[in-house]
Image (tube, helix red, strand yellow):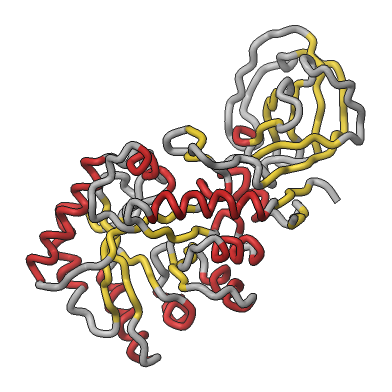
Amino acid sequence: MYPKVYVYLERIYENARYLNNLCNNYGVNIVGVTKVVCAEPHIAQTFVDSGISILGDSRIQNIKNMIDNGIKAEYMLLRIPMLSELDNVVRFVDYTLISELKTARTLGEVSKFFNKKTKVIYMVDIGDLREGVWFDNAVSEVSEALNIKGIEVVGIGTNLGCFGGVIPSKDNMQKLLDIKSKIEKNTGIILSVVSGGTSATLPLIEDKNLPKGINQFRLGESIICGTDATNRRIVPGTRQDAIVLEAEIVEIKEKPSVPYGKIGHDAFGRKPSFIDQGMRLKGILAVGEQDISPSTTYPLDDKDIEVLHASSDHMIIDLTKSKFKYKVGDKIRFTLGYSSVLRAFTSSYVEKVIL
């Protein structure tokens, strides 16, 4: 059945191995982030085979699935946990990202019940406005968390780019290190981990601008897609064809380039805009927003195809400039950016082919 995504494990391995070596040479350990592929076990094992020893995911279900599939690694829960799932956090997770004292205290109590000591990385918001204690309050709050029984706060971390689009820089990484130093001075406890972010932080290593002391990155997009959405770039030294979508044409017709009638909003509440280019040869593929994001779906073999738009189940492409004579039933291949990979692996309507 179509659509399909083809998963090229050797290409993922190449990306993971390259980035692991790049970061390790700079004193940075990688957490391999599996959430974008819903922790598909073959891909998770490929991460481990490349030398990555910690796998990170946002959902306990995915972590449990990797454990059940025999993936030998340490596991990090990336999304700050719900109070209602702390039993499973203690049972299945080695490292947990935390941003609330109430959660930390409850996790400590649950950990003691299971006779365990859960490792915690306390998240600090240094400007992106997603999770974390605001940086002005970080020293006092993390210092308090260090006294909670049943957990071990092994370090601090931050997230940049994912909500506010804030780009990691030498200055905001140094701010995180300064907070670490103040916490250590305040408590006398050494923090062994400073988790400096995601694929968006890689340029600081490439440009040799990463302050010494940042020693962990959480990488998923750069390994799977070879891209960095925050900085809108291809990551040097990586492949972008590790995941390939193949979709089938269900209609080809010549139609105007501008809709006929008063323009309102589309099915997703967006108001589309159009440029009048006269009549165009348009194709419809049996794939849509439920499966991919059209803005991060890129023609692989025929660069003259233009992706125009998509509804939930149809993606519209412009074939006018193509040198190929397509017909209904033909298949077209695409490489995928982060948001499209996320949707494709989440969608049960997209067949996953492991190669």
Residue under the image location 23 percent in, 55 percent down: 213
Which is nearer the eye, 162 or 74? 74
Residue under the image location 28 percent in, 64 percent down: 193
Residue under the image location 75 percent in, 30 percent down: 301
Residue under the image location 79 percent in, 46 percent down: 3
For the C terminus, the image quarter is bottom right
Answer above or below: position of 326 versus 60: above
Left or right placement of residue 347 versus residue 32 in this view = right
Q: Position of residue 221 (x, y in %)?
A: 52, 48
Which is nearer the eye, 52 or 100? 52
Q: Position of residue 17 (x, y in %)?
A: 52, 54
Answer above or below: position of 99 versus 295: below
Q: Position of residue 26 (x, y in %)?
A: 33, 51
Left or right placement of residue 162 versus residue 72 in this view = left
Answer above or below: position of 40 versus 230: below
Answer above or below: position of 207 versus 221: above
